[in-house]
Image: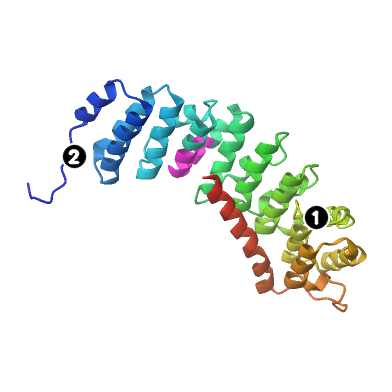
Amino acid sequence: MTGGEYVAPAEDVFERQHSGSLSNPQFAGLVGQVGLHARRGAPWACRLLYRWLAVEESDTRRVILLKTMIEVGCRDCPLDMLTRLVAVPHTDVCQEAAHLLVLAGPSGERALLATLGRLRGYLLAISLGQLASGNGPLDVATVASYANHPNQHVRLGTLGTLAVRGDGTCTGKLAAAIDRSDIPTRDAALTALVTIGGPDAVDAVLKRLSIDAARRSRPETLTVELALNYLGQHAQTRPDALTHARTLIVDHWHRRDEAEIAWIRKNLPQVAPETPEPISPPSSQAAAGMRRPVLARLHRMMQDSM
C-alpha cells in the first residue's frame, strides 16, 4: 500500500453506528460521512445508502438520505424503491425521490411516468415538475395530457416541463390551457408556446389577445407580452396575425402601462402606433432575441424550485 492510496473504512463500521440510537443531526452526520466516501468513489458507499433508505420509515431521514444521494452522485438506487417513495404523502420525500428518478436517466423517467397515474394533487404536480430537470427526449404526449388538469398545481408543473422539454406536438394542449380562468395557468401556457410551440395556436392566441388587450394592463400578468411574443415567433408564417395583433394593440394603446409599452417598443415595435404600415415580420434573429429572456426566466424559476 502506497502512502497516498485511499482506503475505505469497512462497511460494517458504519452499519454498527447506524444500528445505534441516533438523533436526527447525528443521523445526518453519519449519512454525510458515507456520502463523502461515495463522492470519493468507494463502491460500497452508495449501496449502503440504498440499504438504509430501504428500511427507513422516518420521512425526515428519508429526505436526508435522498438529498445526499443526489449530491454525491448515487444514481443506481433501485427504481421500484424510488417510485414507492414518490407516492409518500410528504412533499420533500416525493420531490427528492422524483428528482433522483429523473437523474437516473431514461429508465428512471419511464418509471416516474408510469407512476403518475396513481398520484394525486401536489404529489402529481411535483413529479411532473421534476421532469423539467431531465435531459434527452421527453414522452411529450404523456406529460401534455396533464396540461389542462383540474388541479392548478398539476397544470403549472406540466406546463413548466413542457416549456423546457416539450416540442411542437403539444401545441394543441397548450392552446387549450390559455383559456383557463386563472392567470398563472394562462401565463405558463403562453410561456410554453413562446419557447416550444408551433404555429397551430396562432388563432387561439389572437383570440386570447383580443380579450386581454381590451383590458387595462395588470402588473401580475405577462399575458399581453407573451401573446405578442408568440405571434412574433410565427409572424413569418402568419403575417396576417401580426397585422391583426397590431390593430388590437393600437385600438387599446391607452390601456397599456409603461412596462408593456416599453416591451413593445423594444421587442416588437411593429405593433406600436407610431410604426407606419404596412409592417414587416420580425427577423429570425429578432424573434430569437424575444424568446431568450423567456427561457432565462424559466431556468431561474427552475433553479429557485430545486
The span picked out in magenta is 98-112
Instruction: Give the prevailing secondary structure in the magenta stretch.
Output: helix
Q: Position of residue 87 (x, y in %)?
A: 53, 27
Q: Does dot 1 land on a helix, a strand or a loop?
A: helix
* In the image, residue 103 above or below residue 208: above
Q: Position of residue 2 (x, y in %)?
A: 7, 50
User: Residue at horizontal 75%, vertical 48%?
Assistant: 186
Q: Position of residue 77 (x, y in %)?
A: 38, 35
Q: Position of residue 275 (x, y in %)?
A: 84, 77
Question: Residue 157 vs residue 175: left or right?
Answer: left
Q: Does dot 2 land on a helix, a strand or a loop?
A: loop
* Residue 205 - label: 1
Q: Nearer the viewer, residue 30 or 150?
A: 30
Name the residue type under label 1.
Answer: Val
Q: Nearer the viewer, residue 254 or 163?
A: 254
**CB under 8 Å between callouts 1 and 2?**
no
Give the Cα separation between the discs numbered 1 and 2.
Answer: 60 Å
Question: Residue 23 vs residue 126: left or right?
Answer: left
Q: Nearer the viewer, residue 226 or 33?
A: 33
Counting other residues with Cα less than 10 Å from the Cα at mark 2, is it few (<14), some (14-19), or many (20 or more)? some
User: Residue at horizontal 29%, vertical 31%?
Assistant: 48
Counting other residues with Cα less than 10 Å from the Cα at mark 1, is it few (<14), some (14-19), or many (20 or more)? many
The residue at which mark 2 appears reads as: 8
User: Residue at horizontal 65%, vertical 73%?
Assistant: 285
Residue found at the very far right of the displayed protein: 251
Is residue 81 visible in the rendered image? The answer is: no
Name the residue type under label 2.
Answer: Ala
